[in-house]
């Protein structure tokens, strides 16, 4: 198993708005590789949520999303309550994972999330070619229509096997 932690940040210029942002991580370049688990999972949030992801035994993510009431107390804690955009996730059992972040109504879409992918990789593999793609649809004040954006990065990740 290989854990891929990613941090995705999409913050639009004040004159622009993201309508959606899609992050894809493809590890299918390694024969026999497949996605074992993903975090976060599908979410739609009109109220703040507290997300806890527990990494246990290298085999699975335990994810707990606890909805909070709209009335928050004045007590100060170290936990963070966050409003998330709609998130759709897919890819378990396949060679690539997709996270889609979608604006809810007319609220601005701001993405600042840690994404995790747990991949089952054959023991004989010495490296993993991984391709990260980020796509977005942007509208800008004063211009009709949407502007598509795309960025790609390909890296080969060397694996070190314990002796």
Image: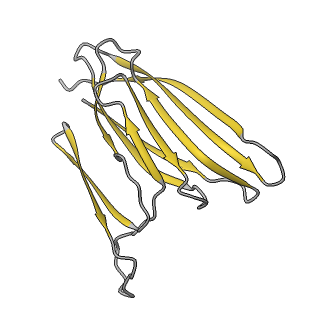
Question: Is 42 located above or below residue 127 in the figure?
Answer: below
Name the residue located 33 percent from the left edge and 72 percent from the top edge.
68
Give the camera-side residue of 139 and 149.
139
Write the residue at 55% across / 49% down: 9
Query: What residue is drawn where x is 56% and y is 58%?
Result: 105
Q: From the viewer's side, name the closer residue of 157 and 111.
A: 111
Q: Is residue 67 above or below residue 158?
A: below
**Residue found farthest to the bottom:** 74
Instruction: Measuring from the top left, give residue 159's x and y in whole percent.
Output: 33, 23
- Specify the quadrant that holds the C terminus: top left
Judge from the rendering whether residue 143 lies leftward or rightward of residue 147; answer left or right: right
Q: Position of residue 28 (x, y in %)?
A: 39, 18
Closer-to-camera residue (15/105)? 105
Direction from residue 121 to residue 5 in the image, left or right: right
The colour scheme used to paint the residues is secondary structure
Outermost right residue: 142
Where residue 110 sits: x, y (%)? 57, 56
Residue 54, above or below 125: below
Which image quadrant for residue 52?
Answer: bottom left
């Amino acid at each position: 198993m290989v854990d891929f932690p990613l941090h995705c940040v999409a913050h639009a210029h004040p004159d622009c708005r993201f309508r959606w942002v899609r992050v894809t991580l493809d590890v299918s370049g390694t024969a026999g590789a497949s996605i074992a688990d993903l975090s976060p999972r599908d979410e739609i949030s009109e109220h703040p949520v507290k997300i806890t992801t527990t990494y246990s035994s290298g085999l699975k993510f335990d994810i707990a999303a606890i909805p909070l009431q709209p009335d928050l107390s004045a007590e100060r804690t170290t936990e963070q309550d966050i409003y998330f955009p709609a998130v759709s996730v897919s890819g378990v059992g396949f060679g690539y994972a997709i996270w889609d972040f979608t604006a809810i109504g007319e609220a601005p879409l701001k993405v600042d999330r840690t994404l995790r992918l747990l991949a089952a990789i054959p023991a004989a593999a010495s490296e993993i070619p991984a391709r990260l793609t980020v796509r977005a649809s942007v509208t800008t004040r004063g211009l009709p229509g949407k502007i598509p954006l795309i960025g790609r990065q390909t890296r080969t990740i060397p694996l070190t096997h314990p002796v």
